[in-house]
Amino acid sequence: MTFDLHSARFQFTARDRIQFPPHQAGNVLRGALGTAFRKIVCVPECPGRAGAGVRECLLQASCAYAQIFEPAAIASGPSGQADRPRPFVIRARHLNGRIVHPGESFCFDLHLFHAVGPPLEHFRGAFQSMAADGFGLDRGKAELANLEVAPVSIALDPPQSAASRVRVRFRTPTELKSGSEIVSRPEFAVLFARARDRVAALRALYGEGPLEIDFRGMGSRSGAVQLIRSDVQYIDTMRRSSRTGQRHGIGGFVGIAEYQGDLREFLPLLTAAQWTGVGRHCSWGNGEIGLEYA
């Protein structure tokens, strides 16, 4: 059993000065990408329509924008999922707070969870349009210089060797919920549950199908894994929707947590979660984690 995806690296050359705000590079790119996607993918399919008419067209199941950016509008998610997760995440934390000068190169990664036939040409066209229109605080323009794509396959079967200790780095703001409550400490059972549910939903919707695992049993056993170190801090940041004008919190904690216990059956799903992210707002880079084994 595997979790399959495609990892794409988009490399650009700046034509103007481009400034990425702190903790907001992924959000800036995701917002600009959504605007470009609507312009080049869907709106041409709605000739003679404007305003609400375009909005209605965008939410049709045949529209690539709806399938990728607003999947909850065209179908319900798996059991326990109020919204279908978007089939991509942006990885751009290295651009947070960075200023790119004309002539300099910069890149970011995109993880696509379509196991077969990822819509790379749609993304290539959208990123080209986005770069030509400009983005960042100064609306600086750029050119798409190169695109590299590689398939990734993660084995989900437990490893043969025992594992009793792991360190998790929360590299970007991560918001985890237990029930309806946001947690302040990354207890293992909560982290694992959110990682398991996200990987399972993405695989069921865009990959090889539902995970064949003991959801309830693994959830119960994960409670025996102890949080032995928590060194996290909360980052409070906001985003503004370019479509609605509303502001939304996209903060969360960053830092390190260490866990100890019988981890063997849980590590494959946590490994996959390094590619998918955990918690909320993963599509623009929140919830990025990294694993280090003791």
Image (spheres, grey):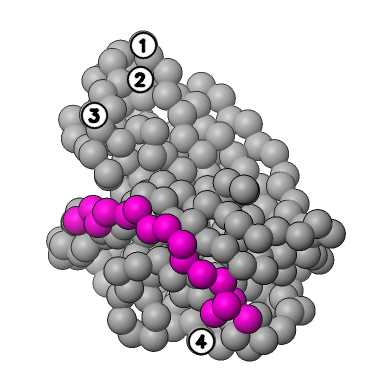
Q: Is residue 205 above or below residue 165?
A: below
Which disc number belongs to residue 80? 4
Q: Nearer the viewer, mark 1 or mark 4?
A: 4
Q: Residues within 10 Å of mark 2 (few under 14, many from 20)?
A: many
SS at badge 1 = loop
Magenta highlight: main SS: strand
Per the rendered image, the range of residues in magenta is 221-236
Q: Amino acid at mark 4?
A: Gly
In magenta stretch: residue 226: yes
Q: Which residue is mark 1?
A: 103
Q: Which one is nearer the viewer's eye here, 123 or 284?
A: 284
Q: Residues within 10 Å of mark 3 (few under 14, many from 20)?
A: many
User: Which amino acid type is shown beneath numbered disc 3?
Assistant: Gln
Please give the residue where the numbered disc 2 appears in the rendered image.
Answer: 14
Q: Please tell me which of labels 3 and 1 falls first in the chain.
A: 3
Left or right: residue 273 compared with residue 70: right
Q: Residue at x 41, y 39 (%)?
A: 92
Q: Earlier in the sequence, mark 2 or mark 3?
A: 2
